[in-house]
Image: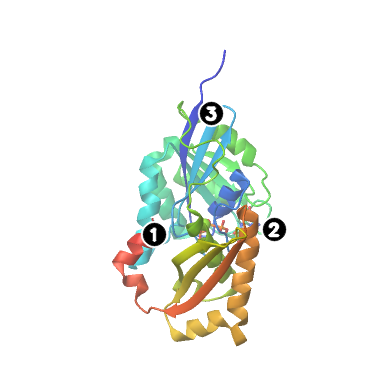
């Protein structure tokens, strides 16, 4: 007898830097979401799609849940929590290299009402700092009976077993997206994200959080190259100096590294053209935040 097709939306939640975006990329086999060691890298709900014979899983990567009342953090938290009730399955990613603490307790509390449709992934078990026993004890205490998997999102170990468990509980239904789609993001959004990733990888302290990439325009050259023009917006003049770097070295590195990644992502060449601008109040601009954080 042929089994029915299954399809599910899976909300991936957890603390900043738990490895949610890394897991999404591992599952989809593509760079769908940007990754960096800086907490709060992801600012949007990013969808990564896995289609195989008989099922389609749509993973929704969410901004890491962080306890703060700043407008931007409130918006990021809203994004993450909204996806909990909508999802068929919740995948709670917990970082086994960090002691759980208060922030983790708050997340466990958010997940609790949805425990029946939730799996936990104890991540980073490949790391020397990993203490998966501590993470499992925490989960057993906070969310007794929750199904738990040890994984390395980076190396891929344990991920197949987790996927099998998710497929098992997924509802029957037709695919939401065409089979060849692994994400639903617009190319100009993905380009802005890759640029942002390079800023996260090469700057420190408050700088990564002070920037956003504003799309201006794009056009195709005769040889099929896509030219992307955008602004790298910072909050202060000093940050502008850091982003531009000595003799323009930093902005050049950001641009070149982004273009290299974008060559792997797209079937055409991408040329990035960036201007650095200052807008001291962008994080308080509700209209802008509404457009940026979706
Ligand atoms: N050793 C190890 N490192 C990992 C693993 N998964 C993620 N990381 C690292 O952890 C850091 C954070 O990873 P992300 O995937 O960006 O984490 P995130 O949960 O998406 O973070 P936010 O977007 O800030 O909420 C990066 O430096 C990753 O390389 C893993 O399985 N093992
Ligand atoms: Mg992320």
Could you classify mark 1 by the number of other residues whose Cα lies within 10 Å: few (under 14), some (14-19), or many (20 or more)?
some
From the viewer's perspective, tell me whether residue 219 is left or right of residue 201.
left
The residue at which mark 3 appears reads as: 168
The residue at which mark 2 appears reads as: 128
Q: Sequence order check: which comes first, mark 3 or mark 2?
A: 2
Ligand 1 within 8 Å of the CB at mark 1: no
Q: Quadrant of residue 236?
A: bottom left
In front: mark 3 or mark 2?
3
| Contact check, label 3 and label 2, Cβ < 8 Å | no
Q: Sequence order check: which comes first, mark 3 or mark 1?
A: 3
Q: Which mark is drawn over residue 104?
A: none
Is residue 60 shown to the viewer in this render? Answer: yes
Q: Sequence order check: which comes first, mark 1 or mark 2?
A: 2
Tell which of 5 and 277 is nearer to you. 277
Q: CA distance from mark 1 to mark 2?
A: 35 Å
Q: Which mark is drawn over residue 293?
A: 1
Q: CA distance from mark 3 to mark 1?
A: 32 Å
Residue 292, x across and y down, in percent: 39, 62
Residue 231 vs 269, above or below: the answer is: below
- Which type of secondary structure does the marked residue at label 3 adopt? helix
Could you classify mark 3 by the number of other residues whose Cα lies within 10 Å: few (under 14), some (14-19), or many (20 or more)?
few
Tell which of 54 and 167 is nearer to you. 54
Is residue 100 shown to the viewer in this render? Answer: no
Could you classify mark 2 by the number of other residues whose Cα lies within 10 Å: few (under 14), some (14-19), or many (20 or more)?
few
- Quadrant of the image containing the N terminus: top right
Tell which of 13 and 21 is nearer to you. 21
């Amino acid at each position: 007898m042929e089994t029915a097709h299954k399809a599910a939306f899976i909300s991936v939640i957890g603390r900043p830097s738990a490895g949610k975006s890394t897991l999404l990329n591992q599952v989809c086999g593509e760079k769908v979401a940007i990754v960096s060691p800086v907490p709060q890298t992801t600012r949007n709900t990013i969808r990564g799609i896995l289609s195989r014979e008989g099922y389609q899983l749509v993973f929704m990567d969410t901004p890491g849940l962080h306890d703060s009342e700043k407008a931007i953090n409130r918006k990021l938290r809203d994004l993450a929590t909204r996806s909990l009730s909508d999802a068929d399955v919740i995948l709670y990613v917990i970082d086994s290299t960090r002691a759980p603490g208060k922030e983790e307790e708050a997340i466990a509390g958010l997940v609790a009402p949805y425990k029946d449709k939730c799996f936990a992934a104890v991540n980073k078990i490949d790391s020397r700092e990993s203490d998966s026993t501590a993470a499992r004890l925490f989960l057993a205490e906070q969310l007794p009976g929750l199904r738990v998997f040890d994984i390395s999102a980076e190396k891929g170990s344990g991920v197949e077993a987790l996927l099998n468990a998710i497929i098992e509980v997924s509802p029957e239904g037709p695919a939401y997206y065409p089979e060849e789609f692994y994400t639903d993001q617009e190319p100009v959004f993905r380009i802005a994200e890759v640029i942002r990733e390079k800023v996260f990888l090469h700057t420190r302290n408050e700088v990564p959080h002070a920037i956003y990439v504003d799309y201006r325009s794009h056009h195709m050259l005769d040889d099929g190259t896509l030219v992307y023009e955008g602004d790298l917006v910072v909050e202060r003049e000093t940050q502008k100096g850091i982003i531009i770097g000595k003799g323009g070295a930093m902005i050049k590195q950001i641009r070149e590294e982004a273009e290299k990644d974008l060559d792997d992502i797209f079937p055409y060449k991408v040329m990035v053209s960036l201007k650095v601008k200052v807008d001291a109040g962008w994080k308080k601009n509700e209209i802008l935040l509404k457009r940026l954080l979706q």
